[in-house]
Image (tube, grey):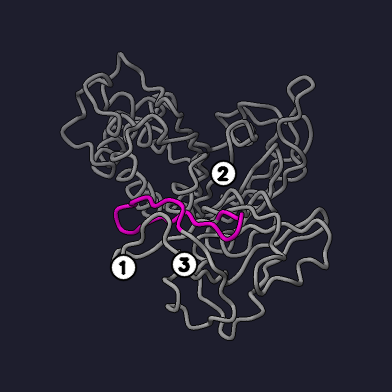
Amino acid sequence: MHIEVRNLNKSFGDFHAVKDVGFEIEKGHLIGLLGPSGGGKTSILRMLAGLETPTSGDILFHGKRVNDLPPQERGIGFVFQNYALFKHMTVYDNIAFGLKVKKQSKEQIRERVMYLVELTGLKGFEHRYAHQLSGGQRQRVAFARALAPEPQLLLLDEPFAAIDAKIRTELRTWLKEMIERVGITSIFVTHDQEEAIEVADEIMIISKGKLEQKGSPWDIYKNPQTPFVASFIGESTIVDNIAELKGFEEAAKRPGTKALIRPEYIEIGKPGEIKLASATLPGKVKHLHFRGSEWMVELLVGETKLITYRSLEKEVLHPGDELSVLVHRAYLFNDNESWIAENTLKVDPMPIHI
């Protein structure tokens, strides 16, 4: 299903939850609606589903305006955050529910249900009830039930929120593989950027009811279009005095400029380890945090606090150690504009690795 949303607005009394949101989604894409809690993500999802009525704006499926269509006529499958399974029904009957409503034959229902049981890895659990299943299994049942009537659009509201961390990671991979196999246009809401980056083909970042940016995870990470996106995606440090760092003196020519510096933009070493000595600054290790595969290093350059990472293969640092610090690039912004700035004292640009 191809989706187009034009100037979508939703107000609840005096609260403007969704503000002039517009976007298009190509058929078969998996989209992550990402942003902080209360930003308007679920309101957008519910309007697409027909569970909320837009205050203004248009929702079009395959070019047809569907604002006034009831949910059951939109061709949508919905997976709720709390699963919303029928407790008195077995796995089989939960999956079959929508097919029975459509008055399909018993043979058609059985064929479709057993196909989805196999697809979702629930074979052998058909006659169990919800309380006899794990959280991950219940979510698979909810997914299968949503797919049973063969919808053209699948909507998922925080689908992994109620599942523990280990199972959540496994289900992310499983969900992406299932949706690719089924080939259905899908939109899921999340406030977890790692989840969105790992699962989605494209991300739409929503904040305070507005669409901040839409694009692939890589595009959004590499080229954030607003200060909010730059600070929300990935780890970073906001620096007020960027013009005091070597190679970024030009920033002083634009009043009010601040910088957002990501860990991978920073190179550190013991004094003398970094070749571009003319571009380095003296720093000091403040804190170290072991992250399993690497160290997260909190450091000070003068009064400026920065964060970066150091490989376990390199010499172990300790709080108080003197450092040479090279900031390769920064995301700069002020009230009027934003841009990426490279360190002007460098010769070769540093590649970004995620």
Q: Secondary structure at mark 1?
A: loop
Q: Secondary structure at mark 3?
A: strand
Q: Which residue is mark 2?
A: 33
Which residues lie in the magenta part?
285-305
Q: Which numbered disc flags the more N-terminal residue, 1 or 3? A: 1
Residue 180 pos. (x, y %): 40, 55
Q: Which numbered disc flags the more N-terminal residue, 3 or 2? A: 2
State the residue in front, 293 or 151.
Answer: 293
Query: Around disc 1, counting alpha carbons within 10 Å, would you say few (fewer than 14), some (14 to 19), or many (20 or more)?
Result: few
Magenta segment includes 231: no
Query: Around disc 2, counting alpha carbons within 10 Å, would you say few (fewer than 14), some (14 to 19), or many (20 or more)?
Result: many
- Quadrant in the picture for residue 49: top right
Report the Cα–Cα distance between label 2 and label 1: 41 Å
Q: Which residue is mark 1?
A: 315
Q: Is residue 353 visible from the viewing direction of this image?
A: yes
Magenta segment includes 302: yes
Residue 300 pos. (x, y %): 54, 57
Is residue 47 toward the left or the right of residue 216 in the image? right
Q: Which numbered disc flags the more N-terminal residue, 2 or 1? A: 2
Residue 173 pos. (x, y %): 34, 50
- Residue drawn 33% across and 29% down? 95
Report the Cα–Cα distance between label 1 and label 3: 12 Å
- Quadrant in the picture for residue 18: top right
Q: In the rendered image of this protein, does residue 183 appear above or below residue 45?
A: below
